[in-house]
Image: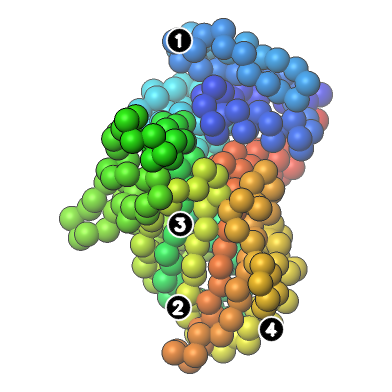
């Protein structure tokens, strides 16, 4: 007997990707239900070789549903996630609503799988921010070996992280550059995104950080180790899919770059492509559609005693969102629910 799974927000970028990955990974589901807002009622979405028609989230009864993958914003999640959890359905939430709740586990399965036991507190599991998820997959095996003191990360985040509106704005503005009569002013982003970079993701906080930067700090501490110091600069770039990060790591102990490379080659969820030659690294275009987090440009930082630099790239719609959520569901199935 398999699971009954609901995908909430099935018509959005992440929701559609969740359906794709459930099918690709042959998740043991007897029934998959696509849920969306009333305005999307009846919209058809793909699930493997099947076509599903979306049902109305507002009217749906979660009783008897084993797992719900939520890919809607915090406002809708605040209403419907507790309703699902109360009905006995385990919620795996992709919004930021529950990430910082001490009673809700924030999980990247390759990094902190044991935290899944905490799901019983509220019947809810949180999925981390896309930029955090790929980074901690690389940090954890290195932290286990040499204890990380401090991380300095600069992100280069694709427009798909801002949803369909972000994708459309980059596409429309790019076309308009070559057609001066068809001006496309910034709407989703604060400035022109085509042929530009914007050092601003999410809202500004009192200390000058943006919320996206704060998320990387708080989530890395919760997932990996609260003692790690993290500082981030998050930048939106004119790339459709795939987040990149330049990561500088300071350790308590010396870690040789060759050993770091070997550790990462053996790490779950990581693919090392690191040749010191033209093209011997991975870029966002090459990671799209892949499950792995790719690591390149591993090298010693000679400016500090125990430092390593690396380049980290991942499909943000997959490992940064949908894939991680499905991996949490798989972990939940193996360790807790044990059906299928």
Label 4: few (<14), some (14–19) or many (≥20) C-alpha neighbours in 10 Å? few
Q: Which residue is at a point 60% across and 65% down the rendered structure image?
A: 138
Which picture quadrant has residue 208? bottom left
114 or 99, which lies in front?
Answer: 99
The disc label shown at residue 122, or none: none
The residues tagged by marks 1 and 2 sit, at their Cα atoms, a distance apart of 48 Å
Q: Can residue 154 be seen?
A: yes
Q: Residue at x 60, y 85 (%)?
A: 255
Q: Quadrant of residue 54?
A: top right
Dot 3 and dot 2 residues touching (CB under 8 Å) = no
In contact (CB < 8 Å): disc 2 and disc 4 = no
Numbered tag placed on residue 156 in the rendering: 3
Q: Is residue 63 visible?
A: no
Disc number lying in front (2 or 4): 4
Q: CA distance from mark 3 to mark 2?
A: 23 Å
Please tell me whether mark 3 sits on a helix, a strand or a loop. strand
- CA–CA distance in space, label 4 to label 1: 54 Å
In the rendered image, the quadrant that contains the N terminus is top right
Q: Earlier in the sequence, mark 1 or mark 2?
A: 1
Q: Which residue has dot 4 on it?
A: 258
Going by the picture, which residue comes out furthest to the left?
Answer: 206
| Foreground of the two, 190 or 123 | 190
Q: Calculate the distance from the C-alpha at mark 1 to the C-alpha at mark 3.
A: 35 Å
**Is residue 176 placed above or below 305 in the rendered structure?**
above
- As drawn, is 258 to the left or to the right of 316? right
* Residue 199, percent from left and from top: 32, 56
For marks 3 and 4, give the CA distance.
26 Å
- Mark 3 or 2, which is nearer the eye? 3
**Residue underneath mark 1:** 38
- Asked whether the beta carbons under mark 1 and mark 2 sit within 8 Å of each other, the answer is no
Which residue position is annotated with label 2? Answer: 149
């Amino acid at each position: 007997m398999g699971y009954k799974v609901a995908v909430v927000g099935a018509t959005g970028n992440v929701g559609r990707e969740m359906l794709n990955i459930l099918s690709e990974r042959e998740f043991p589901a007897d029934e998959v239900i696509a849920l969306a807002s009333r305005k999307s009622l009846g919209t058809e979405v793909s699930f493997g070789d099947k076509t599903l028609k979306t049902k109305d989230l507002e009217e749906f009864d979660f009783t008897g549903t084993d797992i719900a993958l939520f890919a809607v914003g915090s406002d809708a999640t605040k209403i419907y996630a507790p309703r699902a959890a109360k009905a006995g359905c385990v919620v795996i939430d992709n919004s930021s609503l529950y990430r910082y709740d001490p009673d809700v586990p924030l999980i990247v399965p390759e990094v902190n799988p044991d935290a899944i036991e905490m799901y019983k507190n509220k019947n809810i599991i949180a999925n981390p921010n896309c930029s955090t998820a790929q980074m901690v997959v690389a940090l954890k095996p290195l932290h286990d070996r040499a204890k990380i003191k401090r991380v300095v990360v600069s992100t280069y985040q694709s427009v798909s992280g801002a949803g369909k509106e972000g994708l459309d704005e980059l596409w429309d503005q790019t076309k308009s550059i070559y057609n001066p009569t068809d001006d496309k002013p910034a709407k989703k982003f604060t400035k022109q995104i085509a042929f530009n970079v914007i050092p601003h993701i999410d809202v500004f906080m009192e200390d000058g950080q943006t919320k996206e930067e704060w998320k990387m700090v708080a989530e890395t501490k919760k997932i990996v180790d609260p003692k790690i110091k993290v500082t981030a600069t998050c930048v939106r770039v004119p790339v459709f899919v795939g987040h990149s990060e330049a990561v500088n790591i300071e350790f308590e102990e010396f870690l040789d770059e060759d050993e770091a490379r070997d550790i990462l080659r053996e790490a779950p969820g990581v693919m090392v492509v690191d040749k010191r030659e033209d093209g011997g690294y991975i870029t966002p275009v090459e990671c799209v559609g892949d499950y792995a987090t790719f690591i390149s440009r591993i090298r010693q930082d000679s400016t500090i005693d125990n430092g390593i630099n690396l380049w980290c790239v991942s499909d943000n719609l997959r490992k940064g969102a949908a894939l991680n959520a499905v991996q949490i569901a798989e972990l939940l199935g193996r360790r807790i629910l044990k059906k299928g």
